[in-house]
Structures are given as structure tokens and as C-alpha cells.
Amino acid sequence: MGESRQRPDERGNEGLGRFGREVPRELRERIGAWSAHPALRPLLDTLRAQTTLKRFLDYWAEARVADMLLAHGCRLEWEVPTPLGRTCDFHVVKGDQQFYLHVKRLANEENSARRLGISSRLRFLERIKRPFIVRVRWEEDLSEDRMQEFVERAVGFIKISHVGDELTVRADSGDELGGVRIVAPWEGPHVSLAIGLPEGFIDEVPRIRRLLKRAHRQFMPRATNVILLASAGINDASDVETALLGSHEERWDTHPPKGRRVAYGRAADGFWSGRRRPMSRAGAWCQVGLEKMEFPTQLFLREGSKVPGSLESLLRELFEAERTPRSHARGTGPGTTGPGE
């Protein structure tokens, strides 16, 4: 994670330390073998030394990233100093390509674990013919009648609303039933649902932007730097995309795509909007958890900012488990211009 580090425990404790028992054995053994890896032994020692779960998870994110990079045949250096007295988490080299990687973890395990499943009644909302991602939340323990009332009011709202609109749904008695927010356009013809928590929608974008700015301060000058956001939620990649490219907004100064009545673009609040931070050209996201062997990733490349072709191919190999749609990887599009810093 760069910046300040805690001294590793010198006791040489076994495994991965206090919290390593929650890790699948295959991972525990593979990362534990770094005792014989000079470049990664310091990361292993630091991981073992942690006494709080939060700090362990911070370094666990770095360890999972390092494990993935090694599996792709990369050579790694950990905590590489910069001329400004900071550190890059990894110097990554494969063949004649290299870059500096900055890993930041979004601590959202609790929110991700508490996300609700979609009830069968709410599936009715997915029949609405509007090309939007819609975030819904509802109060726990709603009766069948109240859930039906919530769905009916949500349907009426979704049919007439626009990107960015939000409704708090209340019963005739005034009791709150839940909420609905039109989050973003998407490619499908019908509504796609995203689930929030009973007490409110969780907007991680401001926190992600702060992490991006912290990582940017740790860049290695005159080199390719990549920021990787690690989080617990499988759907967090969309928040990373919004933080990088800007919020979705309707546009009236350009023509909509064929078959659409409204054009959408990006607001000027993105980390990459306009001429901001020209040294930042690539970002990525990964899902990290203690008990998971899976390691989903997604890559984002800045529109109009050149990454050498061979290096772009390496980044795609490393951070695209499946090829990222163009709308995610590139394309700030209309509405993303903003003042330089």
C-alpha cells in the first residue's frame, strides 16, 4: 500500500500469522513458500506480523496481487522507493515490459457481506423496458403486502425517471419501505438491478477517489504507473469505473446512439476527467477475500492517453480475466472534459 510500513515480527512464526488460518491451504502454502523468495520475503514477514484484521487484509491484498503476477511469469520488487521519498508497492517486469503498481484496498467487507439477495417480487422490476442500472433497497422484514406496495411504486418511478434520480418509497402511513435510484445507463433493453442495504445506498465512489489520489502521490516519475483498487464486493468494479471516468449524466449536446432516445456521457468529476493527472493512464480492480481462491479482475485504460502496444497487451493479460468491453476500458466520451489541476 506504499507510504509507512510496520516492522515485521522477528519471531519467524509459521504459516501466514494470526489470521492465516482463514486462508485456503493451497494459497497459504504457496505464499508461505516466499520464505525462500528474496524479493517477497519482506512482504511475507510483514503479513505474518499483523495483529489487526484490517492491516492483515491490506497486506493480504498485496500478497494476492503478487501471487497472481508470479503465476503470469512476472519478476517483482516490493516497496520500491521513489525520488520523492515514497514507495511503489511493486515494480513489475516481464520480458522487456515493466511498470510500477500501486495497490489500494477499499475496506468494505462488512457492506459486501450484508448485501441482500433479490426477492422474487423484485424480479418484476427487471421486466421494465428501460436501459438502466437501477439500485434498490428495502426495509428488512417487509410483509408481503408492503413488499408488493414497494414494487408497485418503484415501477411507476422507474418508468418516468432519468439517470441520477432517486426516490424514497413510503407507505400511505408514512413508514419508509425502501428506496430506488437510477444509477447509470447500460447496454440491455430492460432494467438491471443492483442491491443496496436496508439503511441506505452505499456510494463508494468518494472513498475510491481518495484512494486514487493517494496512489497518484506515490507515482514513480517518468515511468508507467498502474493503480489497482482491491475490494470485497464483486460489483465494486462499476464504482471504480465511475471514480476514474466520472459520473453518468444525460447529454443534450450530442446525438444518441442508434435505437436510443437519449445520449449519455460522463460528468467532469472523474479522476481522469479532462487533462487531470496526465501521468495516470491505466487502472485496475480486483476482488479480494480471505476465503476465496477466485481472483476476478478488470482493467481500465484511459481514452486518448497512449500506452505502448506491447505494454497494453501485458496489462490485458494480467488484469482481464475476460476481455473488458470498450465502454469500460476506454471511452471517456462526451461530458468528461474538465479543468486541469
Image: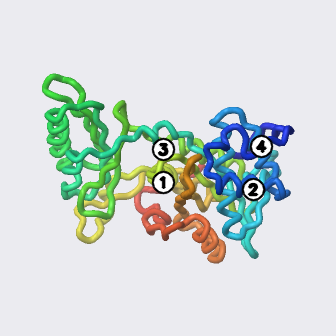
Give the labeled residue for mark 4: 46
Residue at left offset 77%, top offset 61%: 76
Q: Which amino acid lies under the numbered mark 3 shown in the image of this protein?
A: Val
Instruction: Residue 146: name its quadrant.
Output: top left
Between label 1 and label 4, give the one nearer the viewer. Answer: 4
Image spot of residue 11 (x, y percent): 85, 38
Mark number for residue 193?
none
Image spot of residue 1 (x, y percent): 69, 46
Q: Is residue 217 left or right of residue 189?
A: right
Vertical position of residue 92 compared to residue 140: above or below = below
Q: How far apart are marks 4 and 3 (CA)?
A: 29 Å
Between label 2 and label 1, give the one nearer the viewer. Answer: 1
Residue at left offset 41%, top offset 55%: 266
Image spot of residue 227 (x, y percent): 63, 55
Mark number for residue 220?
2
Give the labeled residue for mark 3: 205
Q: Which amino acid lies under the numbered mark 1 shown in the image of this protein?
A: Ala
Between label 1 and label 3, give the one nearer the viewer. Answer: 1
Q: In this view, does 161 lie to the left or right of 3?
A: left
Vertical position of residue 97 compared to residue 293: above or below = below
Q: How far apart are marks 1 and 3 (CA)?
A: 10 Å
Residue at left offset 26%, top offset 44%: 119
Label located before the other in sequence (4 or 3): 4
Q: Is mark 3 on a helix, strand or loop?
A: helix
Q: What element carries label 2?
A: loop
